Amino acid sequence: MNETEQQGLVEKFAEDARERFEALYERMPSWEVPHPQPAFVELADRGWIRGTILDSGCGTGENALMLAARGLDVFGIDLVPTAIGWARSKAQARGVPAARFLVGDALRLDALGMSFDTIIDSGLFHAFGDVERALYVKSLEAVLKRGGEVHLLCWSDQQDGSDGPRRVSQAEIRAAFASGWTVREIVPSRFVNNTHPGGAKAWRASLRRELG
Ligand code: SAH
């Protein structure tokens, strides 16, 4: 695939995803909960979320707001303006003006013109098909500093049923981040949402960028 073809593909993916997710945000999306994911609270407690932080596919911003409230330097991006609007209103209502929210495409993170020490992904990785997934990892590589880390939370293949997002195996995570990355940790976790109050079975993966 040459660069022009790749660009066209990324634009098409963005158009499709914007339409799909915009429709979901017209009502209360099933993943929308009024608190951060416990998996990211735990990582923040451990000090693993540091430096300049990007929340990729931040939705209405609960995880980014939790980090900003701790005094961390965080940007949230999402493809859907409605989600970013909600996130900004929450930041204002909760008195956390330091959280900055932007409409942006996680497949084109280079367009932000920034670089990050830490990127968190709560429920975006599992939304991508195979081709988007590969483009996403490239996009992360474009903005993550050497030694920087991605922490992602995705539904796991151990979750029963066929509702909700695509299930991801540990092997798929390792394969997606095979080149130029090391796996710091992949552990069973939970993705709390409205349909699985105790949380859907998930992987929390922490991946360090060795190049860049
Ligand atoms: N992180 C939030 C939202 C998870 S749902 C949470 O934990 O609650 C996945 C989010 O990714 C949605 O808000 C959707 O609009 C967003 N999204 C989907 N494709 C995207 C893309 N290409 N770039 C940025 N955001 C995207």
Image (tube, helix red, strand yellow):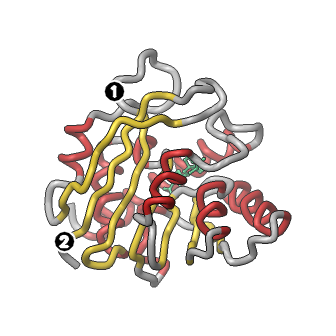
Q: Residue at x 62, y 67 (%)?
A: 103
Q: Which amino acid type corresponds to the residue marked 2 in the rendered image? A: Glu
Q: Which residue is mark 2?
A: 210
Q: In the drawing, what numbered circle is on residue 110?
A: none
- Residue nearer the viewer, 184 or 107: 184
Location of mark 1 (residue) = 157
Judged from this view, the residue extending furthest toward the top is 161
Residue 188 at x, y = what percent?
35, 35
Q: Residues within 10 Å of mark 1 (few under 14, many from 20)?
A: some
Q: Please name whichever residue, 178 or 207, is drawn nearer the observer in this view of the structure.
A: 207
Name the residue: 77% across, 37% down: 27
In the picture, residue 208 is in which quadrant? bottom left
Find residue 162 and report its horizontal and vertical position in percent: 45, 18
Residue 58, position as x, y percentages in the image: 58, 57
Above or below: residue 150 compared with residue 173:
below
Q: Residue type at mark 1?
A: Asp
Question: How many neighbours does mark 2 have within 10 angstroms: few (below 14), some (14-19), or many (20 or more)?
Answer: some
Count of numbered badges drawn on the protein: 2
Q: Quadrant of the N terminus?
A: bottom left
Query: Image height check: is 159 above or below 146?
Result: above
Mark pair 2, 1: CA separation: 27 Å
Residue 94 quadrant: bottom right
Give the farthest residue toward the front: 46
Residue at the left extreme, as displayed: 179
